[in-house]
Image: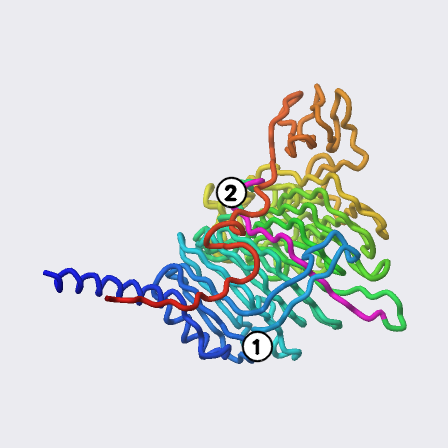
Amino acid sequence: MTKLVKWPLFLFLLTSLIAAEAQIITAASCNASDVQTALNSVAADGTTVVIPSGTCTWTTTVTYSAAHSVIITGATTITGTCPPAGPSAGTCTASDSTVIIDNLNRSSQDNPGLVISTTAGKSVRLTGITFEMSLSSSNNTYNGAIAVNGNSTSVRVDHNHFYQQCSTSFSIDVATGVFDHNLWEAPNFSNCVWNGVRFHRTGVTNDTLGEGDISWTQTAGFGGSSYVFVENNWMEYNFSTGSGGNVIHNAEGNDCDRGGKFVWRYNYMYNIWLQTHGTGSGDGRLRGCRAAELYNNTYTGQNSGSNFDAWADTTGSGLVWGNTVTNAYNSFLTLHIPRRTNSPYTQQATPNGWGYCGTTQTGTGSNWDESASTSTGYACLDQIGRGAGDLINNAFPNATNAATGCTSSSACAWPRQASEPLYIWGNSANPYQNNYILLYDQAITQNVDYYTDQGASCSGSSCTTGIGSGTTLPTSCTTGVGFWNTSTSTLYTCTSTNTWTSYYTPYTYPHPLTQSATGSTGTPPPPPTGLQAVVN
């Protein structure tokens, strides 16, 4: 009888030991082949894959298909105050212990160095790794040195050091996730573009073509969790001005297209600007960025006039508030529509393309816009201030309005997009070289497509234009105007004459994924040691 008890106990303890050991997989080295072997060995949720210290050059892509929840961690640490309120408040530094140098040859194919494909209901964390791009034109990537995609709602990328040259660091296409406490650094360069994070939203919506069509049938959901959040990161680009003095550079903190949605908050950017790509931005069928929230970020720079604009917007709707620009930006915000002119993107006429919005450029408008016969084409497809509309299916030349059955060669293709204005308030943007808001396009109208607190008539008992702020809503209001309640941190909009409706409250900060058991807090988790089972 004694033996019958002990053997089941022994088998239970042995099984527990094997399960415990399976949760920690340490790659033999940081070489691509060893990391791939370790990732291929993941067989249970909660596994931690450790990439050990060392410097390794990758020339082949490493992949992980996340059938299980996993933490991929190295030994790099990020220390200091990241981000501070400004350069004088602290610094953000990296101790580069696990260093991956991306040296993939992309002369024939723009493929990532690391691809993580996620699964619904599973979590992924990538932490404690230094990613560096080799300085060679054949290594440059537009689509991301690291790509994360799929249906996960629990992706965290934290405490990494991205040191990139002439490339996009990250391409992300997931339901929701968070980038936090990372250090991005771009060295001095010329004649190329450095990009931090590129946002898409196609896989999560089961978008057939992968162009963002389904995202454009959905409301923005401001203040909700259905975004990728970028918070508490430090991004900097240091350049030499040379004998010419000021330098206009291309250090982009982000890009967004294909129906992407993102929240950019509490980040510090030095010589860095942000942007979206709109429908018709040079890649045929793709749709523009769907929605964005930018708030409580700090911008600064080396010298006056050396940067483009703090935020260059081309599409969809958004909320831009509480940001601080202290130096070096030409304008705080620019608004324009890519399909209005042939600069910088030439449009192909329907049915083989979206065509130009309005008749100004070629004399011929596009049926994809609200008006094909006017000079502005207003409202342009996916322009600033437009939101959810009919689903568009199929590739050119067979693109179709799924709700009406009309194609781009007919007169009824306009997807009847709802008005969803851009709201801009509470930003401190001085000095800047040109305008607080620089409007490039006559098809974008203030107090219709966008609202701002600059020059607003919104105080006391009446709100007729723009956005006001305070603790008490005005008694009367004109449809579309906004009011920021400073005591509750809530934006109200006037949905009909003299009727205020709660429109937006910022999502939980810090993001819950930075506080959860799977996300964990602080620096990368060390692998457990001393695991053993004792059987009597």
Instruction: Give the image location of residue 380, x and y in percent.
Output: 64, 45
From the image, tell me which residue sits under label 1: 106
- Considering only vertical position in the picture, is 309 above or below 136? above
Quadrant of the rendered image containing residue 181: bottom right
Would residue 283 be visible to someone looking at this image?
yes
Q: For the residue marked with disc 1, what is the amino acid?
A: Arg
From the image, tell me which residue sits under label 2: 218
From mark 2 to mark 1, how far is it between C-alphas?
35 Å
Instruction: Give the image location of residue 499, x and y in percent.
Output: 63, 22
Instruction: Give the image location of residue 310, x and y in percent.
Output: 75, 53
Quadrant into which the N terminus falls: bottom left
For the residue pair 334 and 265, the one nearer the viewer reads as 265
Give the SS element for disc 1.
loop
For the residue pair 11 and 354, the one nearer the viewer reads as 11
- Secondary structure mainly formed by the magenta segment: loop
The residue depicted at 21 percent of the width and 65 percent of the height is 11
Q: Bounds of the magenta span?
A: 222-241
Quadrant of the rendered image containing residue 12: bottom left
The residue depicted at 61 percent of the width and 45 percent of the height is 369
